Image: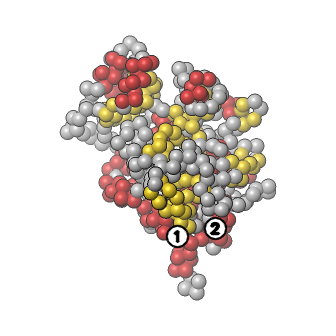
Amino acid sequence: MRLRSLLACAMSLAVTSAVLCAAPALQADTTDTADPIISPALVSEIQAKNRVRSIIQLKPGQDAQAVAADLEQASDSARVLESAQSPHFFVAEVDRPTLEKIKKDVRVQSVYKDELSMPFLDASTALIRSTQANQAGWTGTGATIAVLDTGIDRDHPFFTGRIVDEACFSSSDASDGSVSLCPNNQPTQTGAGAADAETTQCIVNGANACSHGSHVAGIAAGRMATGAPANGVAPEARLLPIQVFSRIDNPLTCALGGTRAPCFLSYTSDQKLALEYVTRAVRTHNVAAVNMSLGGGGPFTEACDGNASAAAVKPEFDALAGLGVAPVVAAGNNGFSNGVSAPACISTAVTVGATDDRDSLAQFTNRGPLLDLFAPGVSINSSVPDDAYDEKSGTSMSAPHVAGAFALMRQAYPDFTVAQSLQRLRDTGAPIQFDAGGTPVITARIDMERATTATRAAADPRA
């Protein structure tokens, strides 16, 4: 996260944040008559495929269902897939006639493909000294971490008594071969059981293929239980798991994601809906961070805010940051020496790269000037479905260390903004130097004992 961007966001988002949190709608902005921003990649794909699943982002105060109804009149083959879940955008299959109509619709902010993202796959708490911070009383108690991923093993002993809410936003689309992972087989579900990863659709060849979310959640907030390797970073923090992935049975769609069918990918539209859900839950559950160990594309060497597709979730990141919630994102596992993936490239993301237990850069980690922090990401042992534990590697494992760190910071410094907590983590972390496109860069690997020591000293003058 770039601090200047976050401070500007916090100052300007009083209205935007309220839109996402409160029931009353804003008045439509009739002064904004600029043409919509159309993704060039979307134009090319529509020309090649005729119809493409797309996100239509609206200007503030516009009526999503009214715009969607007008769009469907543009072509016999145009089809609105979802318009009721969010007041800020809707999803539709867009063809050439429909795109031409959208280009002239001043109610529309931008149009881009509803991309599919993959999870970033394949000793740590001692290294970042969260164990010492926990022993000093900084355990994340009272704070909540939202995890947007492949669901959670909700009865795993690592999470006992600390899952405060659940949700699922998981689309089905016959053209992609995608199937919802919501337990109710619908595109959305909320409440107890909604993010359950132990479902039939998660089973592949007799094994649970939705282990990623449980592993990530355990790193952030697992609490010691029989057979567990150690506590997570914030063992007393609560969890808000949200399923944002869909099962893909189409070999061609999976091949585009670099894997074999069946695979598990996440629509951008489902991520946006999940982030809006977190925004509404911030005050109820005292959410300190949202973790997104997913993404794709790049390398982005500078903030991608002007790229409608790469920065698709920026409005939601901005709203969360304005409410004091850190949007923590894995940098990606491409090994880019001077760039990160999306959505880690968004200016208001807290972007996390991976180191090993010797504080060397993980070979796979993306890096560069957009990186905010490092955390361990090699051979991390954490929870997986069926009440088990296993090792995984990736920036996916690094990001939840930082999400857990923000829960500790919420407890230790309850009045800090996201920018202030991030600066504290930078100032107290272990410096890691690396080369980014020929330029030496230093980025901190988090150290939670140092980050919370000043608070302990202030509380006890003898410390």
Q: Which image quarter holds the C terminus?
A: bottom right
Residue 412 marker: none
Asked if 381 appears above or below 342 in the picture, the reply is: below
Residue at image position (68%, 48%) is: 392
Task: Identify which residue is drawn at 39% across, 44% down.
Answer: 304
Residue that sits furthest to the right in the current view = 227
Task: Tell me the residue that label 2 is attached to.
Answer: 129
Q: Position of residue 416 (x, y in %)?
A: 45, 66
Q: Does residue 198 appear left or right of residue 243 in this picture?
A: right
Label 2 or label 1, whichever comes before in sequence order = 2
Viewer-side residue, 174 vs 157 = 174
Q: Position of residue 103 (x, y in %)?
A: 29, 26
Q: Amino acid at mark 1?
A: Thr
Looking at the image, the residue that sits furthest to the left is 31
Local SS, label 2: loop
The answer to whether residue 185 is visible is no
Quarter of the image for residue 2 reads bottom left
Left or right of residue 382: residue 85: left
In-image side of 184 versus 308 (left or right) = right
Residue 383 drawn at (x, y percent): 71, 50
Q: Answer left or right for 227 relative to 419.
A: right
Q: Residue at x 51, y 65 (%)?
A: 425
In the image as oriented, which residue stretches furthest toward the top?
76
Query: Which residue in the protein does label 1 denote?
Result: 428
